[in-house]
């Protein structure tokens, strides 16, 4: 990991903000004192300072002005108020380049552009590039998957430093903003689908005579092993499944039930429903 130049400010110090801060510090990208955080919850600020040694700000505009990179990690419904507090402050101005990164789910780039760029000239707008990111919860254990989209003012260097930050907590891909609804549906909501299957397999194990602990151990290691095998194989998931499914065997009996109940199509339909809902929520902003 390369070192980040300038201070990074976090607006919101919830779980995802904490995950990114922890990843940045553990990767030695920057010293804790170079990280600013602001949160309306004073106890949360005190915890973050005690846990990571980061600096805290009591005023939102102070954090914004003092940071070269500003990461919005607040709930989507809070974005409007937060942006208003910043742009309506008499101290708001853009004199040096500042990267805005948002991980607020569903909030499009245009929302930030409308609020920030409304009072800025062209030169100032060019110095305020905006990047939207859709991470997922495995970022909390540094195994996250993030999709990122950039507006027209984002440079190659801006993309590079953003990817460095996101890579500290997992993997990242860059794509057009129009595809972020699909990213939300697949990887953003995806951990819930995996947990749903794990939950079901554990219950199935119990139903065929295992105790809960053994069922959980068998299920979790099976997931880990299957993923590792897939990552290290040149075969497709379909081909790997076929190799496990011997004719007339136990696996075939299970797959026949899944096919009969249309489980594969149900999963596809579920992801499509999540993508459609993501589009609907986006319209609210």
Image: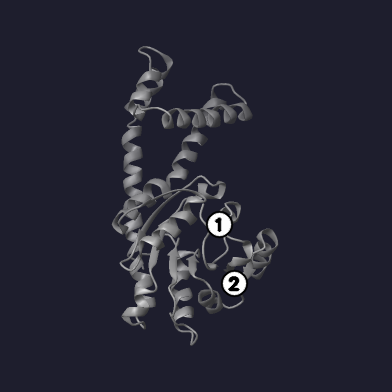
Local crowd size for mark 1, using a 10 Å CA cut-off: few (<14), some (14–19), many (≥20): some
Q: Is residue 246 shown to the viewer in this render?
A: yes
- Residue ID at (37%, 12%): 248
Q: Position of residue 271 (x, y in %)?
A: 35, 45
Residue 2 appears left or right of 247: right
Q: Say if 76 sits above or below 147 in the image.
A: below
Q: Position of residue 237 (x, y in %)?
A: 36, 29
For numbered disc 2, what is the local secondary structure? loop
Given the current orientation, which residue lies at the most extreme right position? 50
Most foreground residue, 155 or 207: 155
- Residue ID at (54%, 47%): 142
Q: Which residue is mark 2?
A: 40
Specify the quadrant of the image occupied by residue 231. Answer: top left
Q: Which mark is residue 29?
A: 1
Marked residue nearer the N-terminal end (1 or 2): 1
For numbered disc 1, what is the local secondary structure? loop
């Amino acid at each position: 990991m390369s070192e980040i130049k300038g201070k990074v400010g976090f607006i919101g110090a919830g779980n995802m903000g904490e995950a990114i801060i922890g990843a940045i510090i553990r990767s030695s990208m920057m010293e804790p004192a170079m990280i600013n955080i602001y949160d309306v919850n004073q106890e949360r600020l005190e915890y973050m300072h005690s846990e990571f040694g980061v600096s805290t700000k009591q005023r939102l505009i102070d954090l914004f002005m003092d940071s070269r990179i500003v990461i919005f990690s607040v709930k989507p419904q809070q974005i409007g108020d937060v942006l208003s507090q910043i742009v309506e402050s008499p101290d708001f101005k853009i004199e040096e380049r500042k990267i805005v990164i948002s991980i607020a789910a569903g909030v499009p780039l245009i929302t930030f552009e409308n609020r920030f760029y409304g009072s800025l000239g062209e030169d100032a707008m060019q110095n305020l590039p905006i990047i939207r990111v859709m991470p997922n919860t495995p970022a909390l254990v540094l195994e996250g998957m993030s999709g990122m989209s950039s507006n027209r003012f984002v440079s190659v260097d801006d993309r590079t430093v953003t990817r460095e930050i996101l890579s500290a907590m997992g993997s990242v891909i860059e794509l057009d903003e129009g595809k972020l609804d699909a990213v939300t549906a697949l990887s953003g909501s995806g951990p819930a689908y995996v947990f749903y299957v794990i939950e079901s397999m554990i219950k199935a194990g119990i139903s065929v005579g295992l105790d809960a602990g053994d069922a959980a151990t068998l299920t979790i290691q099976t997931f880990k092993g299957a993923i590792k095998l897939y990552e290290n194989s040149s075969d497709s998931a379909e081909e790997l499944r076929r190799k496990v499914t011997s004719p007339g065997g136990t696996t075939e009996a299970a797959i026949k039930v899944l096919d009969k109940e249309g489980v594969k199509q149900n999963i596809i339909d579920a992801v499509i429903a999540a993508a459609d809902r993501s589009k609907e929520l986006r319209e609210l902003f």
